C-alpha cells in the first residue's frame, strides 16, 4: 500500500488532493468546524495543502501535530499560520518551529489523520508508531466525549476489506478520499 502511494505521479497526487479538498471543504462537518488539525504529508500521503489553504481563507484555525517535547510517544497540536517557519523532527517531517500553547486534542473540532490503509469499520493502519492512538487514548475512558471528529485521509485505493484491530486502537469516525466522505459512525457519538 505504501509503495503504491509513493508510486503515484505528482500530477495524480495533485489531482487527488484537489478532489479531496472539494469533498471535505464542501461538507457540513468542515463548515461547522473551527479548530482543524491537519498534517504535512510525507512518503506519498495525501497532501492537505489545498485543505489548509481553505482553512486560512475561511479564517478557521489550523493546527499541526508535533512530537511532544517531554513524552516522545505522543503528539501535541500547535496552531499554525500560513508561512510560519518549520523545522524537521527526527523522522524528517516538518513541524512548526514555534511551539507555543499546544492545544489538547479534545479542544479540536476536527482531526485529520494520515493512514496507510482503512476498512469499512473505521479501523486504521498508520505508519506503526502509535502516536495518534496514544494521543487519543483518553477517548477510551470518556465514552460520551464529542470532540474531535476523527477523519482519516486517504486515496480510494487504500481501502481494504478488513484490518485487525487491537485493544489500544482508536477507531475513525470516517474517512475522506478524493471521491467521497464515508462515515463509519455518526460524528459525535460514542467511538468505543
Image (cartoon, helix red, strand yellow):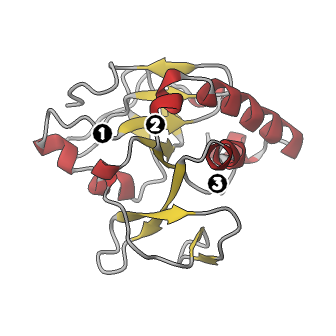
Which residue is tagged 3?
41
Which residue is tagged 2?
33
Instruction: Between residue 115 and residue 33, name the one nearer to us.
Output: 33
Q: Nearer the viewer, mark 1 or mark 3?
A: 1
Q: In this image, 160 relative to 169: left or right?
A: right
Q: Quadrant of the N terminus?
A: top right
Q: In this image, 187 relative to 142: left or right?
A: right
Instruction: Between residue 159 and residue 82, name the one nearer to us.
Output: 82
List x then y, in percent, for residue 26: 62, 24
Instruction: Between residue 74 and residue 86, name the one nearer to us.
Output: 86
- Quick one: label 1, few (<14), some, or many (20+) residues within 10 Å? some
Dot 2 falls on a residue whose secondary structure is loop
> Mark 3 or 2 closer to N-term?
2
- Quick one: label 2, few (<14), some, or many (20+) residues within 10 Å? some
Q: CA distance from mark 1 to mark 3?
A: 23 Å
Which residue is tagged 1?
147
The residue positioned 76% from the left and 34% from the top of the image is 18
The residue positioned 38% from the left and 63% from the top of the image is 75
Dot 1 falls on a residue whose secondary structure is loop
Amino acid at each position: 500500500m505504501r509503495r503504491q502511494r509513493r508510486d503515484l505521479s505528482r500530477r495524480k497526487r495533485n489531482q487527488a488532493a484537489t478532489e479531496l479538498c472539494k469533498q471535505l471543504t464542501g461538507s457540513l462537518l468542515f463548515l461547522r468546524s473551527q479548530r482543524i488539525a491537519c498534517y504535512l504529508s510525507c512518503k506519498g500521503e495525501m497532501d492537505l495543502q489545498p485543505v489548509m489553504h481553505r482553512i486560512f481563507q475561511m479564517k478557521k484555525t489550523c493546527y499541526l501535530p508535533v512530537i511532544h517535547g517531554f513524552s516522545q510517544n505522543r503528539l501535541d497540536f500547535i496552531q499554525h499560520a500560513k508561512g510560519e517557519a518549520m523545522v524537521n523532527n527526527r523522522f524528517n517531517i516538518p513541524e512548526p518551529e514555534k511551539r507555543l500553547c499546544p492545544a489538547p486534542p479534545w479542544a479540536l473540532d476536527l482531526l485529520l489523520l494520515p493512514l496507510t490503509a482503512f476498512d469499512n469499520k473505521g479501523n486504521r493502519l498508520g505508519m506503526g508508531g502509535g502516536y495518534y492512538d496514544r494521543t487519543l487514548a483518553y477517548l477510551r475512558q470518556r465514552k460520551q466525549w464529542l470532540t474531535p471528529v476523527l477523519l482519516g485521509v486517504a486515496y480510494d485505493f487504500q481501502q481494504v476489506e478488513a484490518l485487525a484491530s487491537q485493544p489500544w486502537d482508536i477507531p475513525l469516525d470516517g474517512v475522506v478520499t478524493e471521491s467521497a466522505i464515508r462515515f463509519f459512525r455518526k460524528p459525535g457519538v460514542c467511538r468505543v
